[in-house]
Amino acid sequence: MNLPAPMLKTLLEHEARQEAQKGQLGTAWIDSGYVFTSSIGTPIDPRNLYREFQKVCRVAGLGDWHPHELRHSAASLMLAQGVKIQVVSQVLGHSSIRMTADVYGHLLDPIDGKLPRQWARCCGTTIRARLTFEFAQVHRRSLEDYR
C-alpha cells in the first residue's frame, strides 16, 4: 500500500514505541502480530477502543463520534483536497468507484472549489492534531494503570 509520508512516519514511530514496550515487558508481552494492540500485545477489545475513543472525542470537544466516522471524514477530506475519486475508492477498499461516488458524490462538485480545500486544510489539521494529542494522553494514562 502506498502510504502518505506523514502516515508512514507515524506508523514507524508507533512501531518504535511498541518495540520499546515489548522490551520492557519481556516474556509478559504477547506477540499477536497486530499493529495496534493492548499494552501487553493482545488484540484491542473493540469495547475498550470505543470507550477510549469516546473519551478522546469528548475532551477534544467533538461530541460523541463513532470510530467509523473517521473513515467518512477521511474520505470527505481527501475529496475536498482534490484527491481523485479512484484513489479515494482504493484507499477505502471499495469494490468500485461507483460505490464511492454514490456515498460521496455530493462532495465532488462544490460551488466554490477553494472553500472545501481551505476548510479541510484548517479543520483536518486541527482535528487530527487534537485527536492525536488527546488519544496519546488517554492512552498514556491507561498504560500507566497497568503498571
Image (spheres, helix red, strand yellow):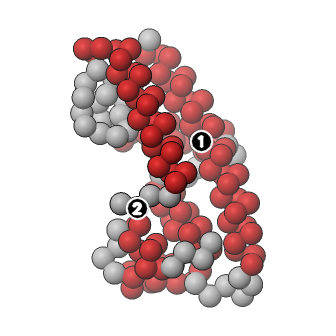
Q: Which mark is residue 132?
A: 1
Q: Position of residue 125 (x, y in %)?
A: 67, 54
What residue is shown at x 68% (from left), y 66% (from top)?
120
Q: Residue 26 sits in which quadrant? A: top left
Q: Which residue is mark 2?
A: 2
**Residue 14 visible in the displayed image:** yes
* Mark 1, secondary structure of its residue: helix
**Residue 45 visible in the displayed image:** no
Q: Position of residue 83 (x, y in %)?
A: 54, 75
Q: Position of residue 74 (x, y in %)?
A: 53, 63
Say if mark 1 contacts mark 2, CB within 8 Å: no
Residue closest to the eye, 16 or 137: 16
What residue is shown at x 24% (from left), y 29% (from top)?
31
User: Quarter holding the C terminus?
Assistant: top left
User: Quarter holding the N terminus?
Assistant: bottom left
Q: Position of residue 78 (x, y in %)?
A: 56, 69
| Residue 133 to residue 2: above or below | above
Measure the C-alpha gap from mark 1 to mark 2. Answer: 22 Å
